[in-house]
Image (tube, grey):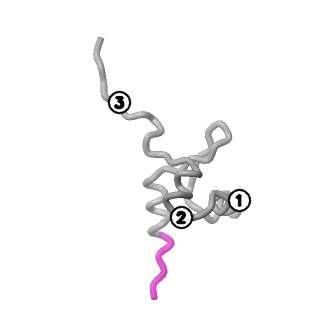
Amino acid sequence: MQTTNAVPLLAEYLSRKKLAEELHVDVRTLARWKTLRKGPPHVVIAGRALYRRSDVAAWLAAQMVSA
């Protein structure tokens, strides 16, 4: 039997709660952004919104405002 160190399929995804903690916003803010199609891209699996870290990073970069 061969063992592999496979990375879990959803390893780079964050739950709404975890992303809210990292962005220092309320979970309801992310839910509102989702409704308004204003926030970072997400996938819905089993009724849960999941956010890929690389998509969140790209979304954050796109929010840059020049002074």
- Give the magenta part as a residue range: 62-67
Q: Nearer the viewer, mark 3 or mark 2?
A: 2
- The mark tally for this picture is 3
> For this rendering, which residue is in front, 25 or 63?
25
Residue designated by label 3? 6
Marks 1 and 3 in Cβ contact (< 8 Å): no
Residue designated by label 1? 35
Is label 3 in a helix, a strand or a loop?
Answer: loop
Give the residue drawn at x 68%, y 59%. 28
Give the residue drawn at x 30%, y 24%. 4
In this picture, is 5 found above or below 10?
A: above
- Identified by mark 3, the residue type is Ala
For marks 1 and 3 on the same chain, the one whose residue lies earlier in the sequence: 3
Q: Is residue 8 left or right of residue 38?
A: left
Residue designated by label 2? 24
Secondary structure character of the magenta stretch overall: loop
Q: Nearer the viewer, mark 1 or mark 2?
A: 2
In this picture, is 60 found above or below 16?
A: below
